[in-house]
Amino acid sequence: MRYLVPAVILLLSACATAPETETPMPTLPVTPSTHVYSSVLGLTSAELIAQLGSPALQVREGVGLKMQFRRPQCIFDAYLYPPPSGQGVTRVAHSDARLPSGADTDQAACISAIRATR
């Protein structure tokens, strides 16, 4: 019995596969997205709140900030990042709009719906 445990361990270790090596992903600079609705591009968090009301969710993601606004019609996410220098106020650099089902929707229509129900 004393030799059974080491034998089982050796048997199981023979079945193990070598770990895969990961290729590091290149780091890309944060630049404004071309998919940002122009009425929110460059806004600060205070300006965004002034236009859309209080966000339902705010999440810090590294140096960025995600602000989510929800209405029954749609969900709007705005992603704010500091300038490339790393110093200064965070501003909207990217945004997404989707239906509650998760399907993409028109950002302008979503923002209009959010403004209308403030």
Image: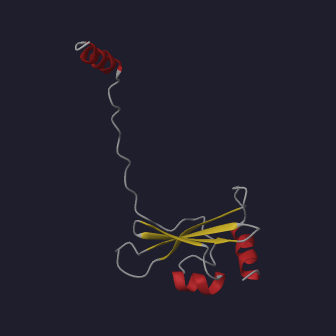
* x then y, percent, for residue 59: 50, 68
Q: Residue at x 71, y 76 (%)?
A: 114
Q: Residue at x 54, y 85 (%)?
A: 46
Q: Describe residue 117's horizontal placement relative to residue 14 as left or right.
A: right
Q: Residue at x 74, y 77 (%)?
A: 112
Give the vertical position of 40 relative to 26 (above or below). below
The N terminus, quarter of image? top left
Give the vertical position of 102 relative to 18 (above or below). below
* x then y, percent, for residue 102: 69, 56
The C terminus, quarter of image? bottom right
**What is the quadrant of residue 36 in the picture?**
bottom right
Q: Foreground residue, 45 or 24?
A: 45
Q: Residue at x 65, y 69 (%)?
A: 76
Q: Describe residue 46's horizontal placement relative to residue 73 as left or right.
A: left
Q: Describe residue 81's horizontal placement relative to residue 87 as left or right.
A: right
Tell me which colouring the rendered structure shows: secondary structure
* x then y, percent, for residue 27: 37, 55
Figure disc tally: 0
* x then y, percent, for residue 74: 72, 66
Q: Foreground residue, 13 or 60?
A: 13
- Furthest-front residue in this view: 1
